[in-house]
Image (cartoon, helix red, strand yellow):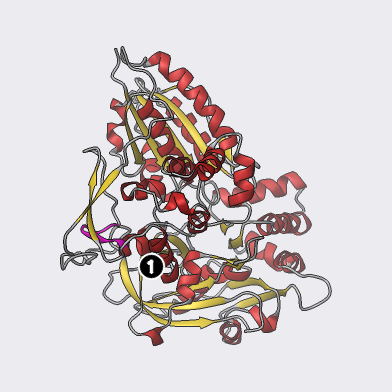
């Protein structure tokens, strides 16, 4: 009989694909499979040719890009020299997690499914496409697909004689156990020796300044924050991204420890329950409860269904247990959505709502119950040529109301906004990643930048870089609400216009009765835009909110191509696609 081994590989940006992969891993264990769950880039990809049964769970990010933790795998799997029979002994299934409001919905899952077939692997099922836009979220697709998956896998890999599927009424062991130390060693939570800056070894950058760049009377608080990266070895260019590892608010950490009756000063080491399980990379050994809760456990995230399922196991209170079981059932998903997702209720708030259960949670299950804090990505808004050893970001502080009395706050933006150099030596863990946008190296190539709101951040870096190199031909379309309230870096742009380094078009949407946006300014300047593209070989860049803006800008550009270039609608569409393919039109958008 074939060895009952299952490999679950995930590519996850926000943690949803990882959560789903771990759910598949738990279901595999109940069916007595030897199961490993790993991020695609943590897995030694050359071993894939030996795998017999693999489930891939992958998200799609941005404009149809792979998540960060599968980029190396992605490059490898599309190598031209791979033989068409490389994976001929593999049975596989692909589950995609995406958002149908984006044009390249589940692009990565579809492309991976096709590529695995080209390499000789056999699909167990058609590719599944989970959708965030569905009322029940991706689970609307995931739940029936998983039932189907096990229905196909078990006949191929029957249960060992005398063993049945482990009942859902049996709790699986925790991934780790916490072994408390009698006294804290001096190295607890300590920094390791200085290593090259990376995700595994972030650099603790000092906050130099934290300036509000919107008027005090403006509803949105936006900051220009500067970090000192001297001694980090960090180098970056325009278009690159800084990753910041946030931490929980001190009052939330205190409340969590009180709810679970934890002593924040206690020190522990983690031991994996299964020998092949790697320890969490970002958690020092030994570690204090304070560090675990402040820097690792994401107590401010909106909990997923798996959280309620596991929490229900620990409840000594019948009423609370029934409610938790309902929230984790397929039938209870609409109610869970209205309790949790719609009002954006946090994990900490949920724990407060289930007090009898919360104080009964075994500590060994904390890392199974609550995911780790994900780093946040920000476009770098400065150039090292203008500001050596410095790095700046333009940060919108996230705060909004739901039906809950307490305003919802973004974990990272609220934390960063609260940090001021006046408080002393304030440090932020960060590292830099290559960005998706690449600016032309040819000195004479003009660039058209369309950056409403904080979308202007990467263009500030590009303009600073190009001005330092003495390059002109910089055209910026900037949009915001009011010139007097949220015209970020306005004085800076005006100086560059005066010195002849920048041509600026502004759209202040609320400064007149009729709203004016960047797309209107593009249409108004259609002759210039077409001339730059057609005769000047210009590159176009677009950054900002992913809602309606990118589509509206694309329509404005197609209108320019039709009116100025005398192209038909289908030719204009093709011209835009050609610009995208040749990387003369690049976008970076976020939701």
SS for callout 1: loop
Which residue corresponds to mark 1? 236
The image shows residue 52, relative to residue 19, as above or below, that is: above
Quick one: quadrant of the C terminus?
Answer: bottom right
Residue 73, position in %: x, y? 37, 41
Residue 184, position in %: x, y? 18, 65
The image shows residue 407, relative to residue 176, as above or below, that is: below
Task: Tell me, yes or no, whether the highlighted magenta stretch contains residue 25.
Answer: no
Nearer the observer, 571 or 174: 174
Count of marks overlaid on the render: 1
Residue 384, position in %: x, y? 39, 75
Image point (21%, 38%), residue name = 275
Q: In this orientation, does residue 308 appear? A: yes
**Residue 3, image quadrant:** top left
Number of other residues with Cα within 10 Å of mark 1, as a class: few under 14, some 14 to 19, many 20 or more: some
**Residue 311, image quadrant:** top left
The span shown in magenta is 283-289
Image point (28%, 69%), residue name = 233
Nearer the observer, 305 or 484: 305
Residue 434, position in %: x, y? 40, 59
Q: Which residue sits furthest right? A: 513
The image shows residue 120, relative to residue 496, as above or below, that is: above
Q: In this orientation, does residue 136 appear? A: no
Relative to 474, 163 lies left or right: left
Nearer the observer, 161 or 472: 161
Quick one: quadrant of the N terminus?
Answer: top left
Image point (50%, 28%), residue name = 146
Relative to 349, 389 lies left or right: left
């Amino acid at each position: 009989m074939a060895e009952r081994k299952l490999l679950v590989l995930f590519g996850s940006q926000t943690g949803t694909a990882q959560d789903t992969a771990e759910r598949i891993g738990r279901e595999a264990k109940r069916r007595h499979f030897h199961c490993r769950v790993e991020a695609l880039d943590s897995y030694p990809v050359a071993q894939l040719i030996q795998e017999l049964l693999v489930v891939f769970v992958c998200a799609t990010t941005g404009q149809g890009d792979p998540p960060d933790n599968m980029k190396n795998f992605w490059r490898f799997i599309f190598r031209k020299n791979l033989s068409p029979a490389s994976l001929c002994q593999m049975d596989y299934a692909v589950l995609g997690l995406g958002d149908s409001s984006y044009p390249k919905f589940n692009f990565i899952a579809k492309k991976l499914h096709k590529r695995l077939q080209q390499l000789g692997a056999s699909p167990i099922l058609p590719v599944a496409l989970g959708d965030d836009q569905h009322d029940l979220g991706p689970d609307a697709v995931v739940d029936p697909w998983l039932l189907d998956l096990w229905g196909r896998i078990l006949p191929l890999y029957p249960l060992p004689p005398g063993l049945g599927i482990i009942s859902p009424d049996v709790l699986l062991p925790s991934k780790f156990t916490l072994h408390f130390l009698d006294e804290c060693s001096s190295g607890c939570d300590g920094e390791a020796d200085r290593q090259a800056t990376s995700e595994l070894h972030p650099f603790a950058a000092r906050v130099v300044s934290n300036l509000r760049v919107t008027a005090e009377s403006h509803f949105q608080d936006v900051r220009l924050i500067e970090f000192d990266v001297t001694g980090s070895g960090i180098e970056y260019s325009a278009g690159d991204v800084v990753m910041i590892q946030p931490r929980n608010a001190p009052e939330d950490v205190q409340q969590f420890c009180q709810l679970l009756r934890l002593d924040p000063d206690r020190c522990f080491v983690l031991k994996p329950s299964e020998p092949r399980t790697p320890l969490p990379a970002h958690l020092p050994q030994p570690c204090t409860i304070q560090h675990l809760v402040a820097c690792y456990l994401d107590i401010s995230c909106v909990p997923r269904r798996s959280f309620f399922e596991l929490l229900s196991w620990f409840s000594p209170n019948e009423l609370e247990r029934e409610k938790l079981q309902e929230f984790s059932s397929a039938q209870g998903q609409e109610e869970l959505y209205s309790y949790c997702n719609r009002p954006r209720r946090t994990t900490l708030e949920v724990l407060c709502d289930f007090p009898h259960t919360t104080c009964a949670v075994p500590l060994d299950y904390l890392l199974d119950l609550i995911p780790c804090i994900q780093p946040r990505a920000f476009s770098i808004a400065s150039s090292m040529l203008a500001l050596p050893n410095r790095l700046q970001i333009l940060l919108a502080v996230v705060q909004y109301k739901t039906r809950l009395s307490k305003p919802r706050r973004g974990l990272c933006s609220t934390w960063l906004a609260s940090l001021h150099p006046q408080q002393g030596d304030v440090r932020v863990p960060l590292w830099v990643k290559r960005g998706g946008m690449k600016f032309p190296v040819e000195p004479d190539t003009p660039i058209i930048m369309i950056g409403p709101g904080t979308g202007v951040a990467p263009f500030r870096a590009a303009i600073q870089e190009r001005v330092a190199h003495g390059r002109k031909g910089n055209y910026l379309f900037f949009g915001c609400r009011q010139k007097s309230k949220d015209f970020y870096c306005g004085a800076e742009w005006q100086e560059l216009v005066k010195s002849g380094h920048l041509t600026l078009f502004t759209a202040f949407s609320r400064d007149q009765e009729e709203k004016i946006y960047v797309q209107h300014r593009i249409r108004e300047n259609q002759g210039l835009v077409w001339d730059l593209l057609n005769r000047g070989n210009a590159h176009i860049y677009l950054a900002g909110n992913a809602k309606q803006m990118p589509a509206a800008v694309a329509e404005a550009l197609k209108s320019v191509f039709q009116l100025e270039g005398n192209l038909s609608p289908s030719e204009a569409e093709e011209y835009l696609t050609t610009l995208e393919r040749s990387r003369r039109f690049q976008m970076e958008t976020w939701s």
